[in-house]
Amino acid sequence: DGGITQSPKYLFRKEGQNVTLSCEQNLNHDAMYWYRQDPGQGLRLIYYSQIVNDFQKGDIAEGYSVSREKKESFPLTVTSAQKNPTAFYLCASQGGHTIYFGEGSWLTVV
Amino acid sequence: GQNIDQPTEMTATEGAIVQINCTYQTSGFNGLFWYQQHAGEAPTFLSYNVLDGLEEKGRFSSFLSRSKGYSYLLLKELQMKDSASYLCAISGGSYIPTFGRGTSLIVHP
């Protein structure tokens, strides 16, 4: 089945650690996005990529990094510079007018 | 830049009709999305409006007025499973989707 796969579903990070969230899509979409969602809040854009080997900062990129070496993959690294990383992270891709979301990843700092 | 406003929370009774409003300001406009999101889950697509007017899809309808920067999502014959957050999003000049904070809808018996 076509779709977007995020992993892991749940992740715990210790202070000072970098962690990477995986996002893979087999929809052949050029555009991919990473959003962060805090409890009771909307989605805030972290990074986006409109074509392979190119990506741009969104509204809250500080403390995060991404890569887009393959069309189907857009991993997000939460670095130790991100002081408040506990949140729900959503990866998405866009085909035509429709945005497709992965199942999301819950990141908690311990 | 872009700004999107939605009510934070609404309550309604099972079987009733509810209208969720969304107002926006944007320098470029390509379309407006509505998404439904149940707690702890990913958003699911409901509608996409490009032109002014009402688009109906089963129990859900979405309206757009570009000149007023206004949209609403209309939910008819409310069911308990409609309790969720409803997200309004704008596709601006760069086609990058920008989401509002969402409206939490509580449906009670």
Image: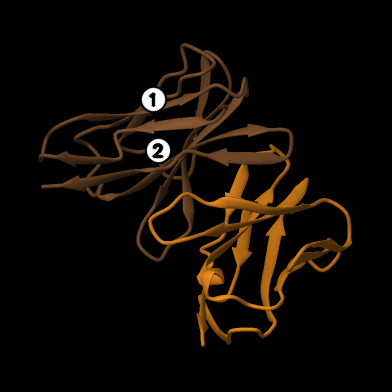
Chain colours: A brown, B orange
Q: What residue type is labelled 2?
A: Ala
In the rendered structure, the answer to whether residue A10 lies left or right of residue A28 reads left
What is the chain identity of the residue bearing mark 1? A
Residue B87 horizontal/vertical position (percent): 58, 60
Residue at the spot of label 2: A61
**Disc marking residue B105:** none
In the rendered structure, the answer to whether residue B19 lies left or right of residue A50 reads right
Q: What residue type is labelled 1?
A: Pro
SS state under label 2 = loop
Residue B97 horizontal/vertical position (percent): 62, 45
**Corner quadrant of residue B15:** bottom right
Please tell me how crowded label 2 is: few (under 14), some (14-19), or many (20+) other residues with Cα within 10 Å.
Answer: some
Residues at marks 1 and 2, CA–CA distance in whole angstroms: 14 Å
Who's the residue at 70% across and 61% down the image? B25
Residue at the spot of label 1: A75
Please tell me how crowded label 1 is: few (under 14), some (14-19), or many (20+) other residues with Cα within 10 Å.
Answer: some
